[in-house]
Image: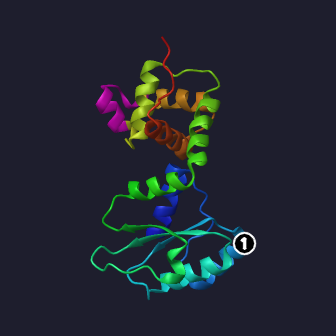
Amino acid sequence: MLRELVASVLAIRAGVHVAAQTGRVADVARACEDHAPDVLLVVASRPDDEAFEAAREFTERSDGGRVIVVGDPERPFDVPDWLAGRIIAVIDRSEPLQRVFAVIDGLMPEARDGREEGLRGRLGGRALSQRESEVFALIGEGLTNAQIARRLALSDHTVRTHRKRIAAKLGTAGSELTRWAIVSREAGRPPANDA
C-alpha cells in the first residue's frame, strides 16, 4: 500500500512515469527488461536488506541507471562499493516527501521545465480570472472543494463551477487538474490573471 501511495504521489506531483513497483528482486529484473527505467527508488534499512539485492539487480541490468535510497535514520549505513557510483541520494525516512521531489527535479530539470511549459501551452493564451487563479492555487495546496469554499467564503457549488471552468481552460480534469495546480504552485508562476 505504501509503495502504491508513493508511486501515485510521484506520478501526480513530479510527473514521473512509474514503470513498476515491487518488493521482489525478480520483479526488478523483469521491469528492467520491459521498461529500461532510469531511476530506482529503494526503501531499505541496511545494506543486507533484500531491497539492496534489488538495487544490485537494477545496476547490473540498467545502462547508467541511478539509485535513490530511502533509509532508516536510526540505522545509518555505509553505501556498498558496488552502489557508490550509481547512488544519487540517501534520504532518511524522517524527511518529508518533498526531499524526494527535490532530488527528482534535480535529476530531470528538463522534465520540470517541460511541465511548466506544458501548463502555459495548455492555457493557450486563455488567462484564468482572479478568482479562478485563487481556486487553482488552493487546489495546488491540496485543499478539497469544501476547504477552498471555507477559505474563500464561497459556496461549494461556486467552487465546483470555478473548478470546471479551470479544467475546461486547461483541457483536463480530476487528478490531472490537481497535478497542474501543484506544478503551477511550485513554479511560483500561477497563470496570468484577467485584468
- Relative horizontal placement of residue 82, taking residue 100 as reference (left or right): right
Query: 193 above or below 12?
Result: above
Q: Circle 1 — which element?
A: helix
* Residue annotated with mark 1: 34
| Magenta stretch: includes residue 153 | yes
The image quadrant of residue 142 is top left
The image's colour scheme reads rainbow
Q: Is residue 192 visible?
A: yes
Q: Residue furthest left?
A: 74
Q: Amino acid at mark 1?
A: Asp
Q: Which of 109/132 is in front?
A: 109
Q: Is residue 158 visible?
A: no
Residue 75: % across, % down: 30, 80
Q: Which of 179/73 is in front?
A: 73
Residue 48: % across, % down: 44, 89
Q: Which of 161/142 is in front?
A: 142
- Relative horizontal placement of residue 88, taking residue 18 as reference (left or right): left
Local crowd size for mark 1, using a 10 Å CA cut-off: few (<14), some (14–19), many (≥20): few
